Amino acid sequence: MPIDINLDRRLENAWFHHEWYIKNLKRNRRSVIQIEMSNGKTPWEASEAFNDELKRIEEMRRVEIDHLYSLIQTENREKQKMEQEEQQQRKRDLSAKRERQRLKREEIKMNPPAPRRSARVANKNKTD
């Protein structure tokens, strides 16, 4: 299954680090093969050694990417779980707040507050 390297910066860094190394190795293929040949290998053996090195690097890249991907998936699951718990806590807090408001409204309906009077009306009533 292909992995989206844009999912996390670490995946992207690992991918391009190995990609840079592979490109440099391919760019210097001729000199690498000549060095192998100067060490006593035939051109075919040197070419095979070069191809084996490329396969080894690509395998290392794949292993590292898979490891990072599994770490990122674990982190994302934990983050999602924490977000769900926070959301449930917000819902509980909101329902408790609504319940308090409902009880307060019922209490006000049962015991209405005294009507408010302005100071002008209160002074007028005192003189009467």
Image (spheres, rainbow, N blue to C red):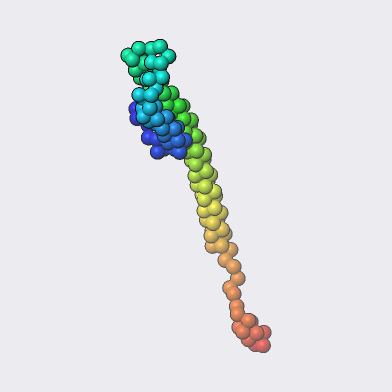
Q: How many marks?
A: 0
Q: Residue at x 45, y 38 (%)?
A: 9
* Residue 88, placed above or below residue 127: above
- Kindly tell me whether residue 73 is visible in this rendering: no
Residue at horizontal 52%, vertical 56%? 102
Q: Nearer the viewer, residue 97 or 87?
A: 87
* Quarter containing the N terminus: top left
Judge whether 88 appears above or below 44 on screen: below
| Quarter of the image where one finds residue 53 | top left
- Outermost residue on the right side: it is 126
Residue 7: quadrant of the picture:
top left
**Relative to 114, does residue 55 appear above or below in the rendering?**
above
Q: Position of residue 88 (x, y in %)?
A: 50, 43
Q: Please tell me which residue is depicted at 39% across the width and 22% down the height of the picture.
A: 32
Place of residue 31 in the rendered image (x, y in percent of width and height, measured from the top left) = 38, 24
- Image quarter of the C terminus: bottom right
Q: Position of residue 22 (x, y in %)?
A: 39, 28
- Residue 79 makes an appearance in the image: yes
Name the residue nearer the viewer: 81 or 117.
81
Most distant residue in the left direction? 44
**Does residue 126 sit above or below 68 in this rendering?**
below
Q: Position of residue 110 (x, y in %)?
A: 56, 61
- Relative depth, front residue between 30 and 53: 30
Query: What is the quadrant of residue 63 in the picture?
Result: top left
| Residue at (45% x, 27% y) in the render | 64
Q: Pick out the residue farthest to the bottom.
A: 127
Determine whether, in the image, residue 89 is placed left or right of residue 50: right
Which residue occupies the foreground of this view, 69 or 41?
Answer: 41
